[in-house]
Amino acid sequence: MNAAQDDLLALVRPDLRGFAGYSSARSSALQGEVWLNANESPWPNPADADAASRRYPDPQPQALRAALARLYGCEASQLLIGRGSDEAIDLLVRALCEPGRDAVVTTPPVFGMYAVSARLQAARLIEVPLRDGEDGFAPDLPAVVEAALAGAAKLVFLCSPSNPTGGALSPDDIAGVAEALAGRALVVVDEAYGEFSGQPSAVALMARHRNLAVLRTLSKAHALAAARIGCLIAQPQLIAVLRACQAPYPVPTPCAQLALAALAPEALAMTRERVAQLQRERERMQAALQRLPGVRRVYPSQGNYLLVRFDDADAAFQALLGTGVVVRDQRAAPQLDDALRISLGTPQQNDRVLAALQKSSPGSLDVPRSCEGRASNGAAA
Ligand SMILES: *Cc1c(COP(=O)(O)O)cnc(C)c1O
């Protein structure tokens, strides 16, 4: 093992560096025709029509791993499939942070799972607040680096595009943080909304920055939230460590089959079309919401949601709820005590949002309605 590889494994908890994990029935290199080594049933369940689920699955289904690696532009050996990227976040914190000792850096207001995983592992949480500027919320990157070094953090989570604030980081910004923390911390870029962003993926930076890792998911743009398929992309040595810490059979076969089908060319083309449609809706909604009285600010967004400040966020939340539209109340989050996060829906659903908010603020101008919704080819359900 060369020095650079040692460097990365030095970030792993010392007590886990040689850990092999559970030795499952699928992980040995045995060959045979009659498999009687895992106490499986010799018959499929009558409900299991294609008998896909009788046996324990491949822990990292090969065809799916290869398809995801193609999709994200990495090697299969750099990719770990988990039960959503949520599991990958948890694995990272568990494998790198010694309880009661090591630290994780986050940039609130941000996706809550980094802090949840840190808490479960009794890792220290170092919070470097986002700064609310003219172009929207953005992390104070020099402060992030400084806090990570000062607190000897093992992990730095950067969310790009960031949930719920919507901003995305440039490759130069991410490379700068990775460079400054080389050998000191793993920089994890959460690209759950990467498909909606104008910024390229940080995966391309990984060849030059070994302490960089990227999270991707099929839950958002690919419309498979219930299949729970998310990925961590990182150096193969780190992937191997996390595999050892993961549950023995983390990817259910029906989920893997569905995910693989979703990555076939036709489905992928439809996904891309819908991403483009949501990007157009994002632009339309940004402008329309901004014109509504009672709306203080609509943040620019690279995701499939808009963060909106209201004069009376409670009234806006209730007005939406009153017409059956449920949005995310952000008021408990730091710096967001007047804000709601509104996911982008179909053009018709977005029109309902505008109509409800319009009605709740009488005396306002007319809202331009979507023509796309009515003229659509029926792709939007
Ligand atoms: C939704 C979301 C996730 C979780 O995705 P899963 O793959 O469904 O676990 C991760 N990160 C961010 C920022 C998210 O918003």
Image: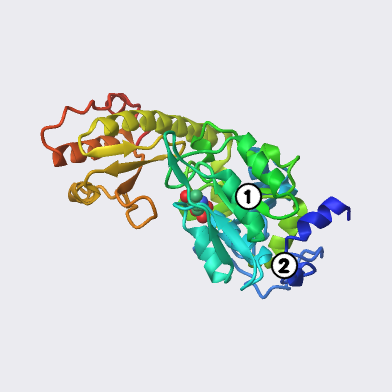
Considering every residue shown, the one lying at the far right of the view is 1
Q: Is residue 57 above or below residue 302?
A: below
Q: Nearer the viewer, residue 188 or 267?
A: 188
Give left or right: position of 85 versus 334. Answer: right
Residue occupied by mark 2: 13
| Label 1 CB-ligand 1 distance < 8 A | no
Per the model, the C-alpha gap separating discs 1 and 2 is 21 Å
Q: Residue at x 22, y 49 (%)?
A: 324
Q: Nearer the viewer, residue 22 or 58?
A: 22
Q: Split into 4 quadrants, where in the image is the N terminus?
A: bottom right
| Mark 2, other Cα within 10 Å: few <14 / some 14–19 / many ≥20 | some
> For residue 12, what is the image quadrant?
bottom right
Q: Split into 4 quadrants, where in the image is the C terminus?
A: top left
Where does residue 26 sit, x and y in percent of width and height? 72, 65
The answer to whether mark 1 and mark 2 are in CB contact below 8 A is no
Q: Which of pointers 1 and 2 indicates the residue nearer the eye?
A: 1
Amino acid bearing label 1: Val
Where does residue 348 sit, x and y in percent of width and height? 27, 35
Task: Say whether residue 260 is visible.
Answer: no
Secondary structure beneath label 2: loop
Considering every residue shown, the one lying at the far bottom of the view is 39
Where does residue 318 sit, x and y in percent of width and height? 20, 51
Number of marks drawn: 2
Q: Nearer the viewer, residue 234 or 125?
A: 125
Give left or right: position of 212 versus 327. Answer: right
Q: Residue at x 20, y 35 (%)?
A: 293
Task: Say whether residue 156 is visible.
Answer: yes
The tag on residue 145 is 1
Q: Residue at x 21, y 28 (%)?
A: 367
The tag on residue 332 is none
Q: Nearer the viewer, residue 140 or 374?
A: 140
Amino acid bearing label 2: Arg
